[in-house]
Image: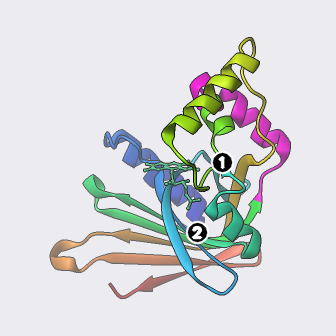
Amino acid sequence: MTDPIRKFNRWFDAAAKAGIKEPNAMTLATATRDGKPSARMVLLKGVDHGGFVFFTNYESRKGRELAQNARAALVFYWEPLGRQVRVTGRVSRVTAKESDEYFATRHLGSRYSASASNQSRVIASRAVLERKLARLKEKYRDDGPPRPIHWGGFRVQPDEIEFWQAGEFRLHDRVRYRRRGSSWVMDRLSP
Ligand SMILES: Cc1cc2nc3c(=O)[nH]c(=O)nc-3n(C[C@H](O)[C@H](O)[C@H](O)COP(=O)(O)O)c2cc1C
């Protein structure tokens, strides 16, 4: 297959069909300007315009790192299928409209939580967070809170995608795609 995004979608559908609870859970690795790495799980919310989209707080650690260094790596692991997918690419914010649209689809409780949380900042106690949540619920009780200006999506525009399929006795299959202009170059890598 010459289009790795189509291949990704096929593998993703297979992972969903295999009954994996959160096939969209992925490790997101970012780094500071001087290359100090950090990684955490996030949820893939769509693959569109050829990019992998997730949502978060722009002022979180990952958000601050992406502001300094707009490159990231993603890793999916679908254990029942013996499959791993690795992605690297440049990262940009999705439009405010896209973030608004996605925010509106979220559960009311999750919208409040996003509004209450200064993600990745130190807080004095759980009670501080809960008081803030209660104040927001009081303030926006009719419609729910608007999308916080610092909450939204990022899109990882892949320049490299690797598909790994577990093989017998660890003789795995690794197929790497690298973007070359508008097409992709495919190579098989030694396991
Ligand atoms: C399965 C799973 C899915 C998660 N999905 C998200 C997500 O989509 N967005 C997000 O901001 N945090 C998500 N988190 C929380 C992050 O892993 C992380 O704790 C948080 O974003 C703060 O990361 P940071 O301090 O590196 O910015 C998820 C955690 C888990 C375990």
Does 176 sit left or right of 178 as displayed?
left
Relative height, residue 77 to residue 54 (above, below) = below
Does residue 47 appear anywhere in the picture? no
Q: Residue at x 62, y 46 (%)?
A: 46
Q: Are marks 1 and 2 in contact (CB under 8 Å)?
A: no
Q: Position of residue 162 (x, y in %)?
A: 48, 73
Q: Which residues are magenta?
A: 93-111
Q: Mark number for residue 55?
A: none
The residue to which callout 2 is attached is 2
Name the spot of residue 175 as percent of width and height, x first.
45, 76
Extreme residue toward the front, this view: 124
Q: Residue at x 72, y 76 (%)?
A: 69
For marks 1 and 2 on the same chain, the one whose residue lies earlier in the sequence: 2
Image coordinates for residue 182, horizontal then vertical, percent? 76, 72
Q: CA distance from mark 1 to mark 2?
A: 42 Å
Q: Secondary structure at mark 2?
A: loop
Residue 101, magenta (yes or no): yes
Task: Say how many tags the image has.
Answer: 2
Residue matched to label 1? 118
The amino acid pointed to by label 2 is Thr
The C terminus, quarter of image: bottom left
